[in-house]
Image: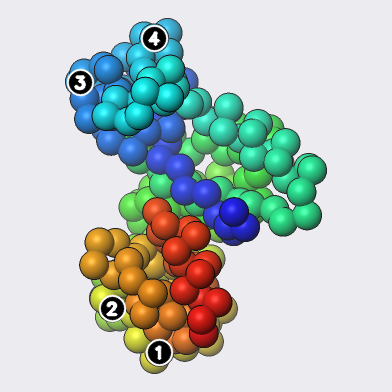
Amino acid sequence: MGVDYIEIDVRTSQDGKLFILHDGNLDRTTTGSGPLKAKTAAELRLLSAGKGADEAYRQEKIPTLDEVCRLLSDWNKTHRKKASLYVDCKEVAPAPLLATLEKYALAGTSVFYGSDDYLAALREQRPVARIMPGLTSEADIEAKVARLKPYAFDVKWQALTPSLIKRLHDQHIRVFSDALDYFETGEQYRSAARNGIDVIQTDYVQRVKEALKEQ
């Protein structure tokens, strides 16, 4: 589909295996229940990750980080348009996360999102990691830049302004933002693009592409 990034949420099983699941609990999207971190990898592999979806998806399993990395690595080897990972570090230690990404030569292009403390710990293990803290107030910019030297900031959509984006770009910091709910409109996409946003996060890739063609 021509995307630059694929967002994944990484969590750790009871026995230390890394899985991709948005929710901390299994109940909403799988046939399991309770926290993912309380289950072993073998227990997780028995579950369907197609709960609430069409019948065609009922056999889908919760993917592991290793599986996702292998799939993306294979894609990038055979396509001109490459994609990178946007890694939401939900429940995962930096060391095993980085080890898996490095195994597939994906660590260098991945962007890591998490708490400031987590990103600082990850940066200690990989000084060149592309880290992306959240930014909730312009007043926090200088302190976060001094501590983390971020590759990008995740900025709330409603806080995007041309002046904020320029301020960050002047410091060679990229701007990501998630177009959630009522911001998922063509005019919102076009406005963000005109203002200079670097990455629009969306569940509706084709809708964004079509809207930006109308610029």
How far apart are the alpha carbons under marks 1 and 2?
Answer: 10 Å
Question: Can you say whether 144 is above or below 194 in the image?
Answer: above
Find disc 2 in the rendering and name its residue: 159
The label on residue 46 is: 4
Q: Sequence-wise, which precedes: disc 4 or disc 1?
A: 4
The label on residue 162 is: 1
Find disc 3 in the rendering and name its residue: 34
Choose top left, top right, bottom left or bottom right for residue 77.
top right
- The reply, left or right, for residue 55 in relation to residue 25 is right
Q: What element carries label 3?
A: loop
Residue at 72%, 56% (x, y): give it.
Answer: 81
Q: Closer to the camera: disc 2 or disc 4?
A: 4
Q: Is mark 4 on a helix, strand or loop?
A: loop
Q: Sequence-wise, which precedes: disc 4 or disc 3?
A: 3
Tag count: 4
Label 1 crowd bin: few (<14), some (14–19), many (20+), radius 10 Å: some
Amino acid type, mark 4:
Leu
Residue 158 location in percent, x, y?
Answer: 26, 76
The one of 58 and 171 positioned closer to us in this rendering: 58
Amino acid type, mark 2:
Ala
Q: Sequence-wise, which precedes: disc 2 or disc 4?
A: 4
Q: What element carries label 2?
A: helix
Choose top left, top right, bottom left or bottom right for residue 200.
bottom left
